[in-house]
Image (cartoon, helix red, strand yellow):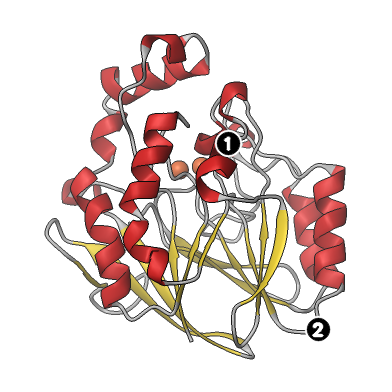
């Protein structure tokens, strides 16, 4: 089967005044005064669903940060944007931007459904999604004791190869522990320990770091993929653009990877093969 992986769309809509009395005020300053808003492209975001369908995906996984600051307007826009993908099985978890403030908590579920730890039969193997995002003044995530126990139980009861999906990287592009700690999963080591404990885990999919990369984790050298932000603007001088991945999956795991890059007009397979174009 062909599994598409999208992540970090960062759909942005202007916040209302009443929504600015918290961390979001800093976020809006960051977005508009310091130009972060220009890092993302509505045109690329809107082209993404059709490109995923054109890439002959059988199912889609999204590893979070659908929105910029977790408002109703942004969730509504993200949900509307992704409607064309309703034709496919769609598996999704929130990112840290989707639980941007305490008042954002619960909003993701209203628009995108259940979260927590969930395992899905996606055909040749299982997909286990774990939500490790919590509101935080910085950008940190945490898998609490209940989440780790639920993940241990979900992986322990699996009889099939399993892809693990979470928002945060465990390792950086060089295979080192991901950082800085201000924007990382605090207890990534505990999640890594569960990957080692459960050999059914044959691949890890994540987002959060907007420049995509592939790496490996743990003594078993489990393959890890981050497409890079799917909502990024086309900024070739900064070597930055939107990406998504399509994995060929069989009952052994991921056996092939295509990475699609936005060229300012369309998404096309990365020239030279997946991850050869950088960004
Ligand atoms: Fe992000
Ligand atoms: Fe993130």
- Counting labels gives 2
Vertical side of 269 occupied by 7: above or below? above
Front position in the image: 108 or 177: 108
Front position in the image: 107 or 209: 107
Secondary element at tag 1? helix
Residue located farthest toward the bottom when viewing the structure as drawn: 251
Numbered circle sitting on residue 183? 1
* Residue shown at 55% from the left, 35% from the top: 107
> In which image quadrant can residue 155 be found?
bottom right
* Residue shown at 71% from the left, 61% from the top: 118
* Residue shown at 26% from the left, 68% from the top: 51
Numbered circle sitting on residue 159? 2
Q: In the image, 140: left or right of 147?
A: left
Residue 169, position as x, y percentages in the image: 59, 53
Work out how far the residue at label 1 is from the one at label 2, CA to CA, in angstroms: 34 Å
Label 1, residues with CA under 10 Å away: few <14, some 14-19, many ≥20: some
Residue 94 visible somewhere in the drawing:
yes
Determine if the C-beta at disc 2 is less than 8 A from ligand 2: no
> In which image quadrant can residue 134 be found?
top right
For the C terminus, the image quarter is bottom left
Label 2, residues with CA under 10 Å away: few <14, some 14-19, many ≥20: few
Determine if the C-beta at disc 1 is less than 8 A from ligand 2: yes
Mark positioned earlier in the residue sequence (1 or 2):
2
Assess whether mark 2 and mark 1 are in contact (beta carbons under 8 angstroms). no
Q: In the image, 207: left or right of 85?
A: right
Residue 276 visible somewhere in the drawing:
no
Residue 159, position as x, y percentages in the image: 81, 83
Secondary element at tag 2? loop
Vertical side of 151 occupied by 186: above or below? above
Numbered circle sitting on residue 242? none
Q: Nearer the viewer, mark 1 or mark 2?
A: 2
Residue 232, position as x, y percentages in the image: 29, 48
């Amino acid at each position: 089967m062909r599994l598409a992986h999208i992540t970090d769309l960062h759909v942005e809509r202007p916040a209302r005044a009443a929504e600015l009395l918290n961390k979001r005020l800093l976020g809006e300053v960051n977005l508009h005064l310091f130009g972060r808003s220009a890092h993302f492209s509505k045109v690329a975001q809107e082209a993404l669903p059709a490109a995923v369908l054109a890439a002959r995906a059988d199912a889609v996984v999204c590893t979070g940060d659908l929105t910029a600051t977790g408002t109703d307007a942004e969730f509504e826009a993200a949900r509307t944007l992704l409607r064309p993908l309703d034709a496919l099985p769609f598996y999704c978890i929130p990112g840290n931007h989707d639980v941007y403030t305490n008042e954002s908590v619960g909003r993701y579920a209203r628009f995108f459904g259940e979260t927590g730890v969930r395992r899905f039969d996606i055909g040749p193997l299982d997909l286990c999604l774990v939500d490790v995002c919590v509101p935080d003044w910085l950008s940190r995530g945490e898998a609490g004791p209940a989440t780790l126990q639920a993940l241990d139980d979900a992986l322990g009861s699996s009889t099939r190869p399993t892809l693990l999906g979470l928002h945060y990287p465990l390792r950086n592009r060089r295979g080192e522990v991901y950082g800085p700690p201000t924007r990382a999963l605090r207890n990534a080591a505990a999640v890594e320990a569960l990957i080692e404990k459960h050999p059914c885990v044959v691949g890890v999919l994540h987002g959060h770091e907007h420049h995509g990369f592939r790496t490996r984790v743990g003594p078993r050298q489990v393959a890890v993929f981050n497409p890079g932000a799917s909502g990024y603007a086309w900024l070739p001088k900064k070597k930055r653009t939107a990406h998504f991945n399509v994995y060929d999956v069989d009952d052994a795991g991921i056996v092939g990877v295509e990475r699609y890059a936005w060229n300012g007009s369309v998404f096309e397979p990365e020239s030279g093969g997946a991850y050869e174009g950088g960004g």
